[in-house]
Amino acid sequence: MLNFNHIIYFILILTSLTCTSQVHKTDAINPSEKMTEQDWKNKLTPEQYRILREKGTEYPNTGEYNLHFEKGNYHCSGCDAILFKSTQKFESDCGWPSFDDAVKDAIEYKLDKSHFMIRTEILCKNCGGHLGHLFNDGPTATGERFCVNSVSLKFKKE
Ligand SMILES: [Zn+2]
């Protein structure tokens, strides 16, 4: 019984450490942003929170904007900053909305070594929200493919 309590205690400490480091990471990305993780939880839907703040991924071919090709702008669903334009979107068949370029200075790039891969994570520069990943196998002139979760985006018609 004592051992079991120790394990629970250990898990609680680990959880609190993880939470603390996440807050610091967010602060580092955008020092001017004063939103706490609790503020984000209140503001976002559970699915938005899972993807934007916990770096989750939506299931392929399920996102609202995967096969969406209207004219307009794609904003960050966390803070409303403009991230992509419809002219930058292309059909990639990868299961997520894909763009060959982004709005200037809207994106933060970060090396991501999780899941035994080396990838470039893309985040909203304004609020630090996780968007997806950047790959260099794009079919257009830029050679880039911004692979983005629909949940991280909010489309606004032009
Ligand atoms: Zn944002």
Image: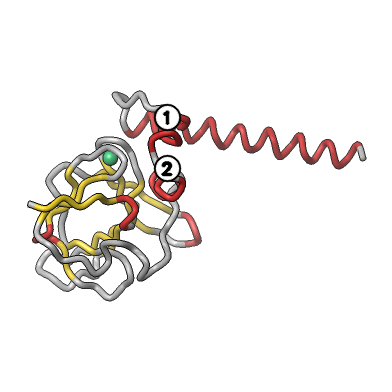
Q: Is residue 138 above or below residue 101?
A: below
Q: In this view, does 118 lie above or below 34?
A: below
Task: Tell whether 88 sits left or right of 116.
Answer: left
What residue type is disc 1 on? Asp
Q: Is residue 2 above or below residue 141?
A: above
Q: In which quarter of the image is residue 100?
A: bottom left
Q: In which quarter of the image is residue 43?
A: top left
What crowding class fits label 2: few (fewer than 14 Cα within 10 Å), some (14-19), or many (20 or more)?
Answer: many
Give the x, y percent position of residue 118: 40, 59
- Distance from label 1 to label 2 (Cα)? 11 Å
Mark 2: which secondary structure? helix
Give the x, y percent position of residue 98: 24, 64
Q: Name the residue under label 2.
A: 53
Q: Name the residue under label 1.
A: 39
What crowding class fits label 1: few (fewer than 14 Cα within 10 Å), some (14-19), or many (20 or more)?
Answer: few
What residue type is disc 2 on? Arg
Where's the N terminus, which quadrant?
A: top right
Most extreme residue toward the right is 1
